[in-house]
Image (cartoon, grey):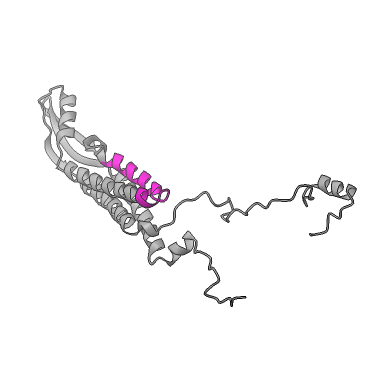
Amino acid sequence: MGRVTAASVPQPRATRAEETAAAPGGRRSLAAALLLGALGAAVVLLASGQTWAEGTVAVGGGSVPLDAAGGDVTGVPTALAIVGLAALVAVLAVRRAGRFLVSLLLTLSGAGAAVAAYLGASDRAALDEKAAGTTGDAAARVEALTHTPWPYVTAAGALLIVVAGLLALRHGRTWPAMSGRYERDGGPRAPRTTRPAGAAGPDRPEDLWKALDRGEDPTHDA
């Protein structure tokens, strides 16, 4: 008989969770991406609802104040922030090439929201449209136009989404993925064992009585 050494004994394969824990910075980068992505999307959604531009329009010898919220100027940042949130969740549900594509989508959604917010910081079309509607004159233009800092706050929030996407692109391969291999208690499913035909089941009283009728000892462990 050959000598059995420690090297010849098969070693258990490391689980995905153990590999993730061993990966340097894996869980830290995941926590950072989730925090930055969620925070960035929240900032974009909040700032897009604030006033981005203010002005007045002349009506009957006087002036009427007008203002435009971010959603009046452009709805792109809000839409892309929602896409970013969806991608942030989906990045944990996919693996390999799918994770890369979702991470890329997360990055691009943040970049697109940032660009749209920056361009909206100098927009006057939304207030000109309100001026025309207020006066009933399609040629009316807003006067004393000013812009608030909220478009730049929106762009800053979108950049946080970009950072989350870059983290996913860089470290996403070390992150765990959602799996259906676990029960509600978080532990792995116990393998089912087959029982020979006619053997008594410990949790079925009728099998115990049948075993006794056959003259078998149901408490005997073969």
Count of marks placed on residues? 0
Residue toward you, 147 or 37: 37
Name the outermost residue toward the top.
Answer: 136
Q: Specify the segment rendered in magenta.
A: 77-99
- Residue 209 in percent (x, y) is at 86, 47
Q: Residue at the location (43% across, 67% down)?
A: 22
- Residue 20 in percent (x, y) is at 43, 62
| Image quadrant in which the N terminus is located | bottom right
Q: Residue at the location (53% across, 65% down)?
A: 12
One can see residue 67 in this view:
yes
Q: Residue at the location (16% across, 22% down)?
A: 136
Q: Is the stretch drawn in magenta largely helix, strand or loop?
A: helix
| Image quadrant in which the C terminus is located | bottom right
- Residue 65 in percent (x, y) is at 18, 34
119 vs 83, left or right, is: left
Relative to 204, say whether 126 is above or below. above
Name the outermost residue toward the front.
Answer: 1
5 vs 222, left or right, is: left
Residue toward you, 150 or 202: 202
Residue toward you, 75 or 128: 75
- Residue 211 in percent (x, y) is at 85, 49
Residue 122 within the segment the image draws in magenta: no
One can see residue 43 in this view:
no
202 vs 19, left or right, is: right
Residue 95 within the segment the image draws in magenta: yes
